[in-house]
Amino acid sequence: MAEAPPTVALLAGHISHRGEVRRLAQLVDRLAHRSVAALVICAGGAADLRELGVPVLEDPWLHRPWLSRLAVRRLLIDDSDPRLSLVHALHDEVAEAAAQLSATRSVPLIRTIEDDPPTDASLRLHVPHLAAVVVPDEGLRRRLVDRSFLAEDFFRVIPPGIDPGIGSRAEHDPPASGRLPVIGAIGRFGPASGFETFLDAIFRIVESGRDIEFLIGGLGPGEPRLRRRAQRLELTARLTFAPPAALESAFWRVITLYVHPATGATTAPALRSALVSGTPSLAGDVPGPRSLLADGRGVLVPPADPSRLAAAILELLDQPLRARSLADQARSWAVPRFDPDREADALAGLYHATVHPPRHHR
């Protein structure tokens, strides 16, 4: 008798704020072609997803741990809701709600950990029904094994799919005469994000008299503090803060160089997108970016050193042929590694194996 295809609840944060509407819609479509029915449940951005024909439920309490139990009850109280086979928490902020939903429905739970959690944060991995944790790379898996004392095979390395169409080579050629170069950085604002270092590097570049524009986009509560710092450094005429949704729109089409200034271990999600887009990239020499930019795929600089970062940016701007060579090599490596179809294959395989584990015959 044929096994029924699994129905998976994909729990997500505010997908519009995260700039993940198109990516999530494409993932749902790819899973459908692999006999997986996906229902998206998100904390915000449902209207944007519905416009793309994706089944979705929304509750703004979903990403608030103290209200997640009520959010789950409000969303799935209707008997017409599909019979879920498993729950997958795509984002850290909905991990608590996903655990509640998994427990309520008595179905397996899968959790994605996108990036290195703060060293003082609880991993919250010892919860009922947790079947696997998805991580984007081997480095994060090793770091989580060391922190959690869980078996290595509990963590599944599935590189996230990135649309190879973001940006284009032509759009990243050296700026035409009269067009200023644009240096961009995007990511989560936090203690080890390195955005303060980036602002200090911008200050040094502006002080040198170079005519360059800068663009920052990010998530998290640290933006007001960074804006105040930029004002104190008198950078506002050259610096623009962009919404995180720029990841899905103009960001990769307008920047000349990408900077990932992290000062601590990170999987560097935006740096992965930069490599796929064909954007010449620089990053702090820390775990994560170090492996992404290895073998001539980009430029590594000492972390938390704004003088060295400023010098590296200017040097790469002044060497457009080298910058193009680095970006081409990075894109050739990154596009197949972060292939959205490979991600969908791996996730579908994990879902099927979790819902219908193989029988062991004596």
Image: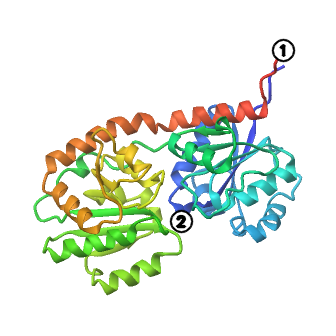
Task: Please provide percent x and percent y for residue 361.
Answer: 84, 14
Total number of numbered discs in the rendering: 2
For marks 2 and 1 on the same chain, the one whose residue lies earlier in the sequence? 2
Please name the residue shown 55% across and 62% down the image: 16
The dot on residue 17 is 2
Tell me which colouring the rendered structure shows.
rainbow
Residue 246 location, quadrant: bottom left
Q: Residue at x 81, y 19 (%)?
A: 360
For the C terminus, the quadrant is top right
The kind of residue tagged 1 is His
- Asked whether residue 80 appears in the rendered view, the answer is no
Q: Position of residue 209 (x, y in %)?
A: 13, 75
Q: Please give the residue where the numbered disc 1 appears in the rendered image.
A: 361
Mark 2 neighbour density, 10 Å: few (under 14) some (14–19) many (20 or more): some
Q: Please name the amino acid that badge 2 sits on.
A: His
For the point 68% across and 38% down, the residue is 151
Instruction: Tell me how far mark 2 sits from mark 1, CA to CA.
Output: 48 Å
Q: Residues within 10 Å of mark 1 (few under 14, many from 20)?
A: few
